[in-house]
Image (cartoon, grey):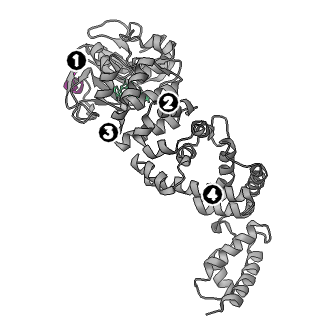
């Protein structure tokens, strides 16, 4: 049982990673925490996931842990624990890759150093643990293995490729986007030689799958402050490769506008959709903007949501111009996204991004007030539904119902009619009568 150690308290107290390391050690194998968990722990952050590496082959792991499962064709093994499946990967070097994304083959290795050499950046190429055939407490005798100077780069806030950057980016061009993601997420500067190669070889990124690009973009947008990352993406020539249309429309203020949306501490944080929408806001044409996101293989629901936010943004601009009032704008918001609160939210986004006119503040106050008062902005929020109205009016269903409900909502949203069944029925009768006058009853 683990008593105390100077590793992370997560490991010592509750985490099964420590037990797994002990179990591997007891079986005579090497046991190391690798990659992100080491980086995050050294930087004082709590790791999200713990990856373990060992010299035990997948077959040896399966013999040592009878309920272990193969996770993928490269022999990563999942060991079920009380806290979910923990992945343990055999030390390996990657063979050549025919598609510049996954190695065709991997070779298992006996030592941790070779495994660290295949990793992308020095800060991601550290391990903490024990070698094979070690004795004593697994955690107390564990040590840091850092052949590429990851710890000092982390101190100096530098993101540096492991080995020759040109070679590493040729092996996997995704590393160029990962460089930008890690640097913006952790506030690291991309080391000059690494950055120079990205700039020179940015064209390699054009061959990446849209799916992988999209995931990295979302990772960059999820940073507390994505602005430096977006600027780097553009300055290094990567935007031109992964979205030529976005590159063509780019504006200097785009990164800071995106970063202002859902920034930490704001009521709307986090706001990944708002940020994604703001990123493509520089593209005026809806179809071209959608094509960029579709090329990045964003889910259909995301494409719809972005399209709704773009249309909502136009309504907000119209409301700021005074073309529609606050109540009508809330209804437009409800129609665009299904959530009338988006009316206020979109104004806050426009104000944060510096795109709003002075009228936005007054409009925002009106929308927030209406939200707080629970003023309906969706037909579904009315205190009567279509069938109640049919009963009250003693009529048969028809095409007249939908415009009647819209008109009813409009009157309620403008506080001309209270949202109570009796008043709504009375108003419905008046509206129905005036409908008859203009269009004739059938
Ligand atoms: P995150 O917190 O984003 O998960 P992470 O460092 O765990 O950060 P992963 O993408 O989960 O990042 O990868 C785990 C480790 O595997 C990395 O730390 C790195 O050592 C290595 N790695 C992952 N992808 C690559 C790649 N494309 N090229 C080289 N090494 C990689
Ligand atoms: Mg990870």
Residue located at (40% from left, 18% from top): 18
The mark found on residue 207 in the picture is 3
Which tag is nearer the camera, tag 4 or tag 1? 4
Q: Quadrant of the N terminus?
A: top left
Which tag is nearer the camera, tag 1 or tag 2? 2
For label 4, the crowd category at 10 Å Cα-Cα, with few meaning under 14, some 14 to 19 and many 20 or more, is few
Question: Where is residue 220 drawn, in percent x and y?
Answer: 49, 34
- Provide the residue span drawn in magenta: 57-62
Question: Where is residue 272 drawn, in percent x and y?
Answer: 54, 43
Q: Are marks 3 and 1 in contact (CB under 8 Å)?
A: no
- In-front residue for pair 393/278: 278
Q: Is mark 1 within 8 Å of ligand 1?
A: no
- Gap between marks 1 and 2 measured at Cα: 36 Å
For the question of whether residue 133 can be seen, the reply is yes
Q: Which of the marked residues, 1 or 2, is nearer the chain's N terminus?
A: 1
Q: Is residue 125 above or below residue 413?
A: above
Q: Which of the marked residues, 3 or 2, is nearer the chain's N terminus?
A: 3
Residue at numbered disc 4: 314
Q: Are marks 4 and 1 in contact (CB under 8 Å)?
A: no
For label 1, the crowd category at 10 Å Cα-Cα, with few meaning under 14, some 14 to 19 and many 20 or more, is some
Is residue 322 within the magenta segment?
no
Q: Is residue 91 above or below residue 315?
A: above
Left or right of 260? Residue 128 is: left
Secondary structure under tag 4 reads helix
- Gap between marks 3 and 1 measured at Cα: 30 Å
Secondary structure under tag 2 reads helix
């Amino acid at each position: 049982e683990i008593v105390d150690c100077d590793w992370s308290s997560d490991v010592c107290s509750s985490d099964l990673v420590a037990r797994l390391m002990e179990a591997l050690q007891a079986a005579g194998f090497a046991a190391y925490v690798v990659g992100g968990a080491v980086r995050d722990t050294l930087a004082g952050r709590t790791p999200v996931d713990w990856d373990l590496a060992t010299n035990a082959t997948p077959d040896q792991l399966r013999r040592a842990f009878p309920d272990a499962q193969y996770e993928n064709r490269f022999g990563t093994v999942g060991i079920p624990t009380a806290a979910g499946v923990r992945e343990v990967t055999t030390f390996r070097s990657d063979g050549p890759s025919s598609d510049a994304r996954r190695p065709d083959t991997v070779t298992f290795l006996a030592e941790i150093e070779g495994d660290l050499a295949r990793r992308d950046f020095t800060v991601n190429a550290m391990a903490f643990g024990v070698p094979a055939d070690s004795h004593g407490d697994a955690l107390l005798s564990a040590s840091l293995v850092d052949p590429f100077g990851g710890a000092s780069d982390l101190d100096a806030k530098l993101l540096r490729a492991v080995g020759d950057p040109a070679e590493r980016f040729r092996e996997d061009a995704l590393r160029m986007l990962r460089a930008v993601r890690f640097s913006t997420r952790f506030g690291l500067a991309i080391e000059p030689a690494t950055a120079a190669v990205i700039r020179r070889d940015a064209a390699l990124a054009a061959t990446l799958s849209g799916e992988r690009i999209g995931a990295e973009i979302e990772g960059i947008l999820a940073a507390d402050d994505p602005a430096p990352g977006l600027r780097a993406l553009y300055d290094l020539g990567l935007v031109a490769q992964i979205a030529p249309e976005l590159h063509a429309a780019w504006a200097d203020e785009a990164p800071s506008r995106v970063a202002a949306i859902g920034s930490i501490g704001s009521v709307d944080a986090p706001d990944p959709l708002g940020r994604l929408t703001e990123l493509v806001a520089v593209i005026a044409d809806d179809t071209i903007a959608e094509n960029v996101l579709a090329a990045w293989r964003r889910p259909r629901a995301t494409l719809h949501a972005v399209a709704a936010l773009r249309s909502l943004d136009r309504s907000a601009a119209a409301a700021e111009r005074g073309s529609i009032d606050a109540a009508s704008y809330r209804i437009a918001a409800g129609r665009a996204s299904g959530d009338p609160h988006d009316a206020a939210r979109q104004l806050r986004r426009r104000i944060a991004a510096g795109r709003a006119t002075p009228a936005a503040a007054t409009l925002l106050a009106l929308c927030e007030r209406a939200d707080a008062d629970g003023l309906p902005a969706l037909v579904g929020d009315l205190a009567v539904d279509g069938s109640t109205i049919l009963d009250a009016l003693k009529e048969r269903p028809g095409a007249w119902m939908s415009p009647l409900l819209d008109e009813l909502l409009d009157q309620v949203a403008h506080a001309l009619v209270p949202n109570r069944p009796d008043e709504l029925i009375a108003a419905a009768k008046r509206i129905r009568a005036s409908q008859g006058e203009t269009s004739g009853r059938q």
